[in-house]
Each structure stands twice: as structure tokens, then as C-alpha cells.
Image: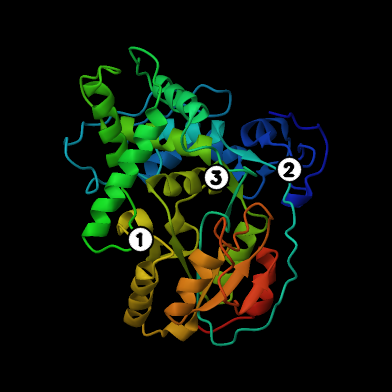
Amino acid sequence: MPEGTPGQECPGIEGRIGLCPPRGSWQPLRSVLLANKAKTFGLGITRDFLRHLPSITKRLQPGINVSDQSTVVGGSLPLEEPRSSSIPPTDVSGCSLPAVEEGLARLVLEHSYCRPVEPADVRPEVRVLPEVRVVFFDLYGTLLLGVRKEPFPAVGPEADSALAQVIRDAGLQPTGPLHGVSELLAELIAASQETLRRSGVDYPEVEICTIWRNLLEELCRQGKLALREITFSLLRRLALHWEMIRNPVWPAPGLQESLKELENRGYKLGLISNSQFYSRTVWAVLLGRPLEESGFEPKLVFLSYEHGCAKPGTRLYELAANALAEMGLSRQQALHVGNDLLQDVVPAQKVGFHTALLAQDRYNLRLTEEGQDAPPVKPDVTLTTLSQLLHCLPGCTK
């Protein structure tokens, strides 16, 4: 992985990071933070936040038992997960999901990277949307930008090697090579999706901890792994670590400032996102607070893993529209902002929302599926930075 050049400004993060890589390369967020004398790192993480991480994790999830002496800065956080009881052998979809645990927080920090934003070949089309009272956002590619320019392979030798390392890093000892483990993981995901389709879900979302439980149980049956028990804590660690390898992210430029300004102008904020439990963890670590303490209305947060359905289906958008109705708001008063024409613009328009295509970075912009034509839709506005959204939404009364 290319190293960054000390002292080089990063235009994609508005010069806030003191050390930044040359265009096209990655820079570890943690090393940038520790090398930067400024208090504010990027758009969310601060030295003070990291220094007080144990007390923050207690505030986010009082049931988690952590040490007040542990600290991220200096690298003294243990790799082990906090204490956790084992989960039933059948399903984990009903388990409560802690927002942040120290072991998971360290995984996020150690596997987070940034790179300069590379503008997409898109011209902004901005106009005022006076009817809007609620702004929904997509998460990945919109508020959290993916670092990778090409997708990490889901199956194959490279994926097998990475998965084997994830399993070993969790303290598990395979009895031999894990050839084909990535294909097995993909098969388990496909089987779970097919089961949901048969139950009537057009675009199913799996529960990733259940998938990982099934994977470990199958490896044990094959004699490739020996485990006394499978804990919820272990499953969360494995799922998060694999996600951070496949899809490292960093906060979009202007994220916190834009959300805060929209909130100040009287808009309600929500999320409609294809996400798993770790999306909450990654957000809380990189932004320093949970989603619901970042300006989002709890009743307007719709994450796919919590409902068993995903975009580009309209189910999450219909749930959002129902929540608006309970607040006395209409669909025409909602705006959905996303980076994907197929998953964001098309379904949001189907349910009657205004739409904004956010084209911040060429590698995060999704105009079509591979091998397919772009859908024949046009968003209400097209933006190339988050801050341009403020020109569309001058303010409203709550």
C-alpha cells in the first residue's frame, strides 16, 4: 500500500488533515491523527474523543463492561472483545446490538483509511426545493465514502486469504488451509437471500452475524475449525473485520457541518441505507457519536438489516413514508440524497420523494449496474458536494 507524503494537503478533505497521501493512494486515519498536532482530525475524530473512548463506549452502551484505564492513543487497547454471553445456536437477529465496544472500535480505527476525493465528470444542477421538510440520506458512498477504487473480490484466493486472516486475528486456529472459505460464505449469503425471497421479500437483506455463525458451524463440521462455543461478541468481531477489509470508509467532506446546518435550518434528518450492525459502529467511531446523536431522528432511521429488506426495493422507502405520515408530513415533503441512481433515485421517486443525486467522488458514484444501461430517471437536483445541498434547502419551520 502506498505511503502518504508528509505535509501534503488533501484537497478532498479541505486541508483539515495535516498529513495526506499523493493522489490515488491511501493514508491510515489512525497514523494521520497521531501525526497531526491539530485537535480536529478529518471531520469527526478528535484526540480527545480517542483519549476518552472507554467512557464514551460506556455512555453508548451501559451494559458493556470496559476498563477506565484503556486508551486508544498509544495502542494499549486490548484486541480481545469485551465480555459477552454466548448466543443461541439458531439465530441472532433478535439480539440487541451495542453501538460501540472497545475491541470493535479499535478494529475500525486500525482498518480505516482516507484518500483524496476524485471529482466525477458530472455538472451540478442545483435549485431550491421549498416543499422539503425532511431530508433522508443514503449512508455508504454518500455520507461515508468508500476508499477502494475497485471492489475487493468476494470470492477467490485473495478473499480466502483475507478471510483466513480475519479468523486467525479473532483468536481462532484453523486446523489447515481454508481454501474455498470465501465461496462458502457467498453460498451461505445466497441461500439466506433465497429463503427470504421465497417468503415474499423481493430484495432481501441477510443478518450478517447469523451468516457468520453458519460459516463457523460449517467449518467445524468440515473439521477445519474446532470451537467450544460461538459467542455474539466473536461474530460481531468477525463480521466487522471482514467489512473493514472489503469496504474501508471515511467521512465525506463537509459532513458534520452540513448535517448541523440542516438541523439548524429546521429540517428533520433521516437515513435509508443498505447496512448491517457494523454501520452503526463505524459511524460512532469515526464521527464520535451514535447515529441518533448526530442529528438523525430515531424514527426516521431505516437500515436494511433491521427490516430484512434492501434497496433498490421500495419497502424501506415505504416504511419511511409511513413514519412521515405519523408525524403529519407528506411524501412530497421528503428529499432523499444518495450516490446511486438505481438504489436511491429510482425507488425514492417511486414512493413520491424528491431526489438528489450526490456525485462527490467518481469511484463512489453509481449510475448503472455493470453491463446495464443507466435507468431512465432524472433526479430533482444533482450535487457534487454535500455543501451544495444547503443551496437547495434555505430553511423551513419545524
**Amino acid, disc 2:** Ile
Q: Nearer the viewer, mark 3 or mark 1?
A: 1
Query: Disc 2 marks which residue?
Result: 17
- Asked if one can make out residue 208 in the rendered structure from this viewpoint, the answer is no
Identity, as a three-letter code, of the amino acid under mark 1? Tyr
Residue 94 placement, left or right of 153: left
Residue 225's place in the image compared with 205, above or below, is above
Q: Which residue is mark 1?
A: 203
The secondary element bearing badge 1 is classed as loop
Disc 2 and disc 3 in contact, CB within 8 angstroms: no
In the image, taking residue 217 as reference, residue 357 lies left or right, namely right
Query: Horizontal and vertical percent for residue 122?
Result: 73, 66
Residue at the extreme right = 8
Q: Which residue is mark 3?
A: 286
- Residue 186 falls in which quadrant of the image? top left
Please identify, in this view, whether the residue under mark 1 or under mark 2 is nearer the observer: 1
Side (left or right) of 52 relative to 214:
right
> Dot 2 surroundings within 10 Å: few (below 14), some, or many (20 or more)?
many
Relative to 208, residue 121 above or below: below
Q: Position of residue 214 (x, y in %)?
A: 26, 35
| Element carrying mark 3 | helix
Alpha carbons under labels 2 and 3: distance apart: 14 Å
The mark that comes first in sequence, 2 or 3, is: 2
Please give the label number shown on residue 345. Answer: none
Please state the horizontal and vertical placement of residue 77, each as a whole percent of the image. 47, 25
